[in-house]
Amino acid sequence: MAEAIAELHRIRHRYGDILALDDVSVTIPARCMAGLIGPDGVGKSTLLALASGVRRIQDGDLRVLGGTMRDAGHLRACHPRIAYMPQGLGRNLYPTLSVFENVDFFGRLFGEAAGERQERINELLDATRLAAFRGWPAAKLSGGMKQKLGLCCALIHEPDLLILDEPTTGVDPLSRRQFWELIDRIRGRRPEMSVIVATAYMEEAERFDWLAALEQGRVIASGTPSAIKARAKADTLESAFIELLPPQRRQGHRVLSIPPRRSESQRLAIEAANLTCRFGSFVAVNNVSFQIQEGEIFGFLGSNGCGKTTTMKMLTGLLPPTEGTVRLFGQPLRVDDLETRRGVGYMSQSFSLYAELTVRENLLLHAQLFGLPPAAIVARVAEMLVSFDLVAVADSRPEALPLGIRQRLQLAVAVVHHPKLLILDEPTSGVDPIARDQFWQYLIDLSRNQGVTIFISTHFMNEAMRCDRISLMHAGRVLAIGTPADLTRIKGKATLEDAFIAYLVAAGGDPDQPASAAPAVQEQPTSRSRAATRRNFDPRRLWAYARCESLQVLRDPIRLAFAFLGPLILMVTFGYGVSFDVEHLPYAVLDQDRSHESREFLEIFSGSKYFEEQPDIRNAQALNRRLMSGELKLAIEIPPDFGKDLTRGLSPEVGVYLDGAMPFRAETTRGYVAGAVLQYMADHAQRSSGASTSLDPVNIGIRFRYNQAFESVFAIVPGVIMLMLVLIPAMMTAVGVVREKETGSIANFRSSPVTRVEFLLGKQAPYVVIALISLALLVLQARFMFAVPVKGSGLALALGGFLYILAATGFGLLVSAFTRTQLAAMFATVVIAMIPTVNFSGLLVPVSSLSGGGRILGLIFPAAWFQQISVGTFTKGLGFIELTQFFIILAGFATGFIGLACIALRKQED
């Protein structure tokens, strides 16, 4: 093991104020199983991300596979030789893709030809006993099966270095054992392959060839497991790790001892009878029955997906059982029985407190929520801070605390209201041994001294040994209940882990028995596939992401409905709901003259399609009241002696009152009134003089071209198409990329030979196709629902739409480069796109009439340019020649947005 696979020299890495790695220098040997041990938050994941090339080096130097990872050329050359499996169950998988499709996707990423890829997939699925599940979606697999599938995906391209970040955290003991047996078989076939593993399980680290123990970003020991134990003078690796910790970390730690229960109470805290829970046709919990005595520590063990968490939620009242009954302290549990639920404390598997609140504020809030007397809340919170050693961090936020302290805070919150029953779902996962022992000291005190009943689930066998009794569960059924010693003795095994596995095997819980032989993997990857992965651009890698994204979208009915039905529904809403046409305006008259002339004057309104006459106004007070109520949009007041003054050649004044709440409508109405009055005056002059008279020196004849009917639908429909094609495609594209950041599958892009251009164009392609289909549907809807035909070139509209969609989805890619959550991506896309599209694109006001900042905003966003194409082809009958400049500009927008997104997206995390 003299040759090194990785050499770290004075590596330092920070996340803001947090120092994740502090001057780390260590050499990891090649062609062996090397392990990084330590709890969460000590820098293991950061070190592995740096070694895989996923994260950028800040300070120091790191050499992997014979070259520095600071060299971009060497980094590109390393990607085909390294496989990286990030932390978390199935974090590198795509839930809606099947087992086969997930592995096939990775094969395509690394440029494997179809025949070679198919052969490798069959070998790996056979070796992991996943072949029978090749059509199952990854989301339906158990935790252990997800990890084995993730391993298949990592091994598809025959890596020289396999990096696994806590691959068995949260995985049941049987699946853990199968996982390591699979690794051993593959290493037996390929002894030249190096493996670096991070783990929080000390017992599984015993099997590694070499270890490095990390604490607070530093390596405190390295070497073989036996050498580390010898140095610490300890019998177990966990004890050795504790002995090697700095003195201040070990201060106050003592060997955990569990006193026997003082008296076994006959009162039952929990009675579960024939408990069943179904989700549709899936049975999560099947006819489970057990009893737990008051003050007892009851352990709940089971395989991944066996129904432990579901059972716990039914016991807390968070989930109603489909069948069966639950009694807590003799009282039936009902979902709406808040009084019984106040006697229960629940700690979920993941951190579930408020990150925005301090430690003290979280305790205060939950004390209030559980109805503690106001006078007792402050004293109880102070007691919790002292009891759980949280005084020093009382005013800190949970996100800034180490995992062990966060778990103590969760436990303090769970017991702040003096519960008689405490339900804990894997509370110590990822916690270091000292913090875990301290956590158990609190549990023992609650059970033995305060009589609290504790129901706890765990995957740590040493924790299960601390329970008074345990229940073994698999596939929704309870297999056995008893003390750890009794269950171990019944199966004739030396350890509880061996006994647990024996129970699972007997229950048919081991469909993946180790194969007698490892798959016939090749000794070295073919040079052809390795060479293919080094290309700067490979359309096969682009197609891999395009195909993957397409499959995910097609299997998500909500997203598909949003993509296709959303624009059609909005078109109906805008087409029928938004109109600038001013017709049938309700008006009424206050005629104080009632002469022949006044009636003749009012006929110009009653005979017009723009006005709709209402009952006469009686007085000035009624005029104001009816305008204020919205009953009238227009009121006309004829003064006394109107007819006489008009006959004498005087100029009588007529009062016209408009509802100005909507300025555009009011301005249009004023134009209609002015036109009607001018027409009346011309007619009156003709009647008086007997000759045709023009009031203006020039007769102007106005004709509307392109929209002779002067109907707003001919402007609204093309504008809505412009709006929909920028909003929804951009939003969906941005979310499609950011979703990879949220789920963690972005690591597949960062740890593979895929370039930024291939990744972005591959993610963009499905949404371009969806948007083109949406464009076709919108054009058909415009033609047949709103009778707005395309008068110009349909091909010009199609080309303009395609370029506009490229620009819109390119804008979505650009937004995704700067956002980290899907919610932020959606809001950013909507807000940024809506302002220039609605206000400055010509939808409401022509861009040519804008000035200053408004005009600039309109011209620097593609919506204003496509609006010219949309209106021009629909209404003006324009073709390719007239629209050429707009095509060029939209192509420039598309290229610019995609180019900026490529620059902004980081191949490595900073």
Image: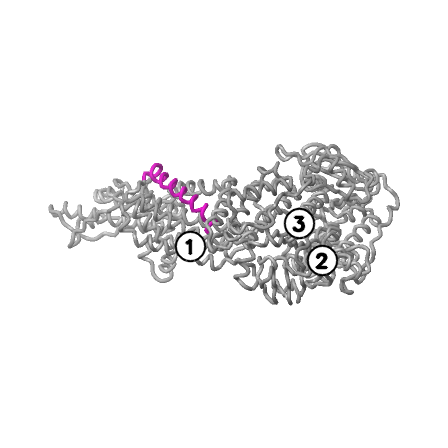
Q: Residue at x 78, y 65 (%)?
A: 247
Q: How many marks?
A: 3
738 vs 147, nearest the viewer: 147
Contact? badges 2 and 3 (CB < 8 Å): no
Question: Where's the N terminus, which quadrant?
Answer: bottom right
Q: Amino acid at mark 3?
A: Arg
Magenta-drawn segment:
761-787
Looking at the rendering, which quadrant does residue 178 occupy?
A: top right
Is 120 included in the stretch rendered in magenta? Answer: no
Mark with earlier residue (1, 3): 3
The answer to whether any part of residue 310 appears in the image is: no
Pinpoint residue 752: horizontal percent, then vertical percent. Answer: 54, 53
Q: Which residue is mark 1?
A: 835
Furthest-right residue in view? 262
Q: Amino acid at mark 2?
A: Leu
Measure the alpha-carbon separation of dots 2 and 1: 56 Å
Q: Dot 2 surroundings within 10 Å: few (below 14), some, or many (20 or more)?
A: many
Q: Which residue is mark 3?
A: 187
Q: Secondary structure at mark 3?
A: helix
Mark with earlier residue (2, 1): 2
Mark with earlier residue (2, 3): 3
617 vs 866, nearest the viewer: 866
**Residue 728 vs residue 52: left or right?**
left
Q: Which residue is mark 2?
A: 211
Measure the alpha-carbon separation of dots 1 and 3: 58 Å
Q: Nearer the viewer, mark 1 or mark 3?
A: 3
Pinpoint residue 233: horizontal percent, then vertical percent. Answer: 82, 60
Measure the alpha-carbon separation of dots 2 and 3: 18 Å
Q: Amino acid at mark 1?
A: Ile
Pinpoint residue 106: horizontal percent, then vertical percent. Answer: 55, 47
